[in-house]
Image (spheres, rainbow, N blue to C red):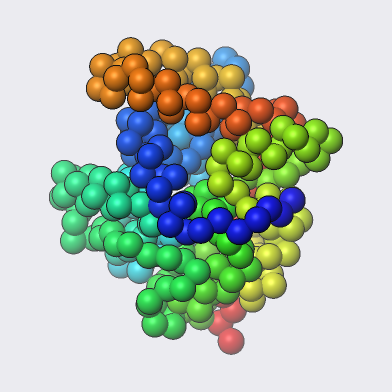
Amino acid sequence: MTRELIDPADIGTHYDERSPIGDEFRNGQLHMWYWYDNEDDTPLKDAVHRISRKVTDTLGLRPGDRLLDAGCGPGETAVYTAKTFGAQVTGITVSAFEIDKAKERAAAVGVSDLATFEYGDYMDLTYPDDSFDAVLALESLQNAQDIGQVLRELFRVLRPGGRISFSDFSLESASDPERVAKFMDTLKLRELPTLAEWLEHTRDAGFEVEEYTQCGPRVFGMKSKYIKAAMDQRDTIVSKFGEEAIAEFSRRHLGFFAPRKHQIGYVIVSARKPRH
């Protein structure tokens, strides 16, 4: 499904407005969660961190690797990657709040020398060709005005043999398009590809796909567990942001929960730029 173009400035505002409370709920990680089943009692922030681990592990990072975190959010995943793998991480985002929060987070744990953050539009990157050994994109390609163009730009800044791993939503069933449309409007999505279409976009940009999975039932399929986990934190969040802010945050996310569990998938794709 493809919608009208969305101004990148609106995407920045979208995250400036939602990220402060989202950052609090998910400990600096704005992407999705991963629960094994309804009996899995893992706390929300740890369930979210599972996605960070699952996606970053597919990159095969080594100490000193230059990593571009394209759409870095408030910085927790970049900080984790720098600490765990010793990678030199450059995080980019179009959200001023996220840049400030990410810098603060890196400084707090002493990795500002490894993890740096700046404004960056992945449709038109300022970095020279072959600047990075790896690219990470956690639920950021979804906001692209042209997914193919973004992947081609990420391909350009990767060195030959460099790796890319991304995770994002996928369309699994279009049987109830009104529900899907509400989901897309809420997240500012122009396009919601199927898994096959995500793979096609990746290959068309020049990448060789090496690994992929669709784990939607353990991600979007566990949306009821997220609602319960969020409600458990509600009083704490209200004490920090106020009742009115929480009510507005909830209102803005109503459409996210509109689709049936089987309609929205979650894909993880890992690919490589050919060496020749």
Task: Return the residue nearer the eye: 247 or 126.
Answer: 247
Is residue 41 depicted above or below 210 in this figure? above
Identify the image quadrant of residue 240.
top left
The residue lying at 71 percent from left, 37 percent from top is 180
Q: Is residue 43 left or right of residue 96?
A: right
Q: Residue at x 74, y 58 (%)?
A: 197
Residue at the spot 68% in from the left edge and 49% down from the top edge: 192
Q: Nearer the viewer, residue 94 or 268?
A: 94
Viewer-closest of 272 and 118: 118
Residue 43 visible in the current orientation = no
Residue 257 seen anywhere in this rendered image of the structure: yes
Image coordinates of residue 189 in percent, x first then y, are: 60, 49
Q: Residue at x 43, y 28 (%)?
A: 249
Asked whether, in this view, residue 203 is left or right of residue 58, the answer is right
- The image quadrant of residue 179 is top right
Instruction: Say above or below: 256 vs 274.
Output: above
The quarter of the image holding the C terminus is bottom right
Picture coordinates of residue 261, whole percent (x, y) = 70, 28
Note whether 135 is above or below 109 in the view shown: below
Q: Going by the picture, which residue comes out furthest to the right?
A: 175
The spot of residue 105 in percent (x, y) is 23, 45
**Residue 70 position within the rendered picture, expressed as x and y whole percent measured from the top left:** 43, 60
Q: Residue furthest bottom?
A: 276
